[in-house]
Amino acid sequence: MHKFSQRNLFAIAQIALARSAQLSSNVRTKSRDVSRVHSPRIMKFSLVTCLCVLVSTSSSPQQPNSSNHAGRRVAIGVLAPREEPRDSATASSSRGVTLGIEEAVRTASLFGWKVVELQAPDSLDAAAALRLLSAMGATAIVGNLTLTLQRAHSGSGPILFDVGRHQHPPRSDCGDSEFHLLPLVDPADGAEQAKPDSSVHLLAWSSSLERFGAAQLNQRYQKRFGLAMDEYAWAGWMSIKVLLDAVLKKGTADPCALEAFLLTGARFDGHKGVPLFFDPETRYLVQPLFAPSTSGEPESVDVYGASTAQRRRSGASSCRSVCA
């Protein structure tokens, strides 16, 4: 039942009083003697009924609505400078995040979840914005974290999704607290990785991709922003998809539970033809990369060695969630 405002309650009382007066008048027309006896009782009964209605509507707890699930909320903190050139990597990833959140809002509502976006004031630097978004209760924070101070391993706080490209090899001591959507600038720097031609800059995404739903994703991005989707935009979009998929699969928005899920072999569809997952030791997304092509769909390149890929697919690792 919905709570009534004082104005609505007063209107109900007026209607009840008018109805009781009408009943009293009807009784008097039939029998003057009977009306003297029963009209006060009718009035009293109506007033008591009215008061019961008022008390029950104002004091009873509000029942849950199917569209309003307490606690089923995913808060996404967006960490991105507001003043960026339109063609910059940061601006591109921000557009991808925007598309991802817009689509996540619609998808989440179908399952009784609510997705909200949190943003820090423009005046804050990246590190301060990161702390503020954490304090605001973000489930996850998304942004280019290449130059951002890393979060201390306190066992609490939001999940961090990094959509930038790094120059240095990933840490192998389970010390990274961020999940990385894009590979290193040079994937050959990673352990047990190789590629056919070191002079080729492999990409995580291309606007020329068509199979496995890639064409539809490229079209949605093009329609929304009037630009071709590059790997930074894909990383921003994919970070939101990973988060919402994890929430829906686990049935919780608890960052610790989601982090543990991401580190234990969770699989995600990134429209690349194979399931994508995070390496539990480096927290980099294991994914096919693409060699640039001047015509047609670019060629997919597997940069991981067989033994490494097998171990990472199985989720076998000594690394655990920082919440554990």
Image: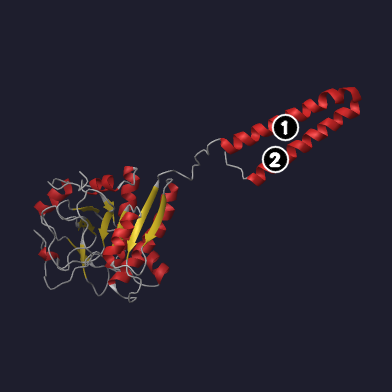
Q: Label 2 crowding class (10 Å Cα cut-off): few <14, some 14-19, many 20+?
A: some
Please name the residue that numbered disc 1 is placed on.
47
Above or below — where is 307 with respect to 37? Answer: below
Residue 136 x/y as whole percent: 35, 55
Q: Which amino acid does label 1 sit on?
A: Leu
Mark number, residue 12: 2
User: Which of the two residues, 274 or 263, is positioned nearer the viewer here?
Assistant: 263
- Residue plotted at (33% across, 58% down): 133
Q: What residue type is labelled 2?
A: Ile
Determine whether the residue tagged by mark 1 lies in a helix, strand or loop. Answer: helix
Of residues 286 and 87, the one drawn nearer to the viewer in this rendering: 87
* Left or right: 22 as drawn, with respect to 226: right
Query: Does residue 238 appear in the picture of this structure?
Result: no
Instruction: Tell me where residue 184 appears, x and y as whole percent.
Output: 17, 65
Mark 1 or mark 2, which is nearer the start of the sequence? Answer: 2
Whole-angstrom CA distance, mark 2 to mark 1, is 11 Å
